Amino acid sequence: MTLLVTGGAGFIGSNFVLDWLAQSDERVLNLDALTYAGNLRNLASLAADARHVFVQGDIGNRALVDRLLAEHRPRAIVHFAAESHVDRSILGPGAFIQTNVQGTFTLLEAARAYWSTLAEAERAAFRFLHVSTDEVYGNLAAGAPAFTEQHAYEPNSPYSASKAASDHLVRAWHHTYGLPVLTTNCSNNYGPYQFPEKLIPLVITHALAGKPMPVYGDGMQVRDWLYVGDHCSALRAVLAAGRVGQTYNIGGWNEQPNIEIVQTICALLDELRPSAAGPYARLVTYVKDRPGHDRRYAIDARKIERELGWRPAETFASGIRKTVQWVLDHAGWVAEVQSGSYRDWVAVNYDQR
Ligand code: NAD
Ligand code: DAU
């Protein structure tokens, strides 16, 4: 059996593929366009593993997706591929509409065409798992109850609007065509292989380089942080036993203001890699706020716990320590990403094959 994973060279996708193949012998067909965020170095340990088949390509390329579905006959699609960074969506929303909306539409149409050719038992077992975000729910007032699956969609950034649009398409393809879909809406992830444009890896790498750690606005925006391995285990649970057509919120039960996250990272670095120049907190620098910045997100993850028995395994204390240590242990990965040379890995590893 085969899973088609889209965006499997990105942060969460590569963690998912690595975790999947550590626990199962089911093949993974990994379709990823290798945008700036896709890094095959993340999957270097699978280079000689026949269970992992990598294809560089765009989810918006219908002919390619049709061919891959016909050739590999996956029993499920796990759809991570997206433009994922809010700040980039503010500077250039076009790519977000193209991949997150148009790309998801193309993937859904290809999946529907393929699914309709399957024998009855395979049709019933097929799943399209759409990996989405808590940002579709918009801003949560201080003290308001955390987002449940019933919360109204109120996206506020080009990124979250494009993800909300994709969620609506996925829902409609189930209600109209019967495609067996599952949607997950997860909170902020952190952990190994996160591109250092996002808060946690950016702050760690800036601190180690002695550069200012930029905190937007007053630093009191609240996010609900989840270790990436816990997101992956939640996705496996939803894929295995989620009810078709349902959405599941995934979160860490760990709301914290950004400035506290930054202070925790500084304290860990002071312990693990003390700087001769003094405590890392000296580098904290408040900068102009993000336009339209949502003040608070928080996930009510009781449905997935009740129905599927999932809860995060990591606490924030254990997850952030692992993450800081991972960055310290992977200076080469960080340097390659920062220099752009991680892109050479494709030529090194694949051009000779
Ligand atoms: P990422 O930016 O690290 O990775 C995205 C991957 O998708 C990259 O490998 C990129 O090359 C690939 N990609 C982009 N456009 C493509 C296209 N047109 N065709 C094929 N591949 C393409 O993102 P991430 O943080 O790993 O997020 C993965 C998914 O999870 C996204 O859908 C995101 O919305 C969702 N999500 C992320 C978080 C988070 O905190 N990072 C939280 C909740 C949900
Ligand atoms: O909530 C889930 C979402 O989390 C995912 O859907 C997105 O793909 C993912 O990028 C993330 O979005 P955020 O905008 O919350 O993540 P980011 O790491 O960019 O920012 C986290 C918080 O930190 C946010 O309030 C903005 C702030 N921030 C971010 C950066 C990059 C700073 O204060 N300084 C920074 O330099």
Image (cartoon, rainbow, N blue to C red):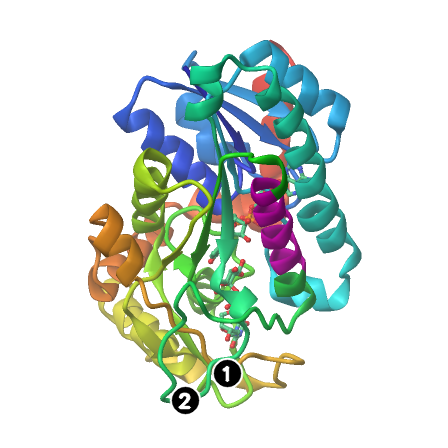
User: Residue 93's spot in the image, x, y percent?
Assistant: 76, 61
- The reply, left or right, for residue 138 in relation to residue 221 is right
User: Residue 244's spot in the image, x, y percent?
Assistant: 42, 40
What residue did someone put label 2 on? 142
- The reply, left or right, for residue 331 in relation to residue 86 is left
What secondary structure is marked by label 1? loop
- Residue 230, magenta (yes or no): no
Asked if the residue under mark 1 is in contact with the one under mark 2, i.e. CB atoms within 8 Å, the reply is yes
- Which residues, given as a range, are shown in magenta? 162-175
| Residue at screen point 39% across, 25% down | 45
User: Residue 214's spot in the image, x, y percent?
Assistant: 53, 77
Give 35 or 211, whichever is nearer the viewer.
Answer: 35
Predominant SS along the magenta part: helix
Q: Earlier in the sequence, mark 2 or mark 1?
A: 2
Q: What is the three-letter code of the residue carrying label 1?
A: Arg
Q: Give the number of marks.
A: 2
- Quarter of the image with the C terminus is top right
Q: Which mark is residue 295?
A: 1
Res 37 seen here: no
Are there few (<14), some (14-19), or many (20+) residues within 10 Å of tag 1? some
Q: CA distance from mark 2 to mark 1?
A: 8 Å
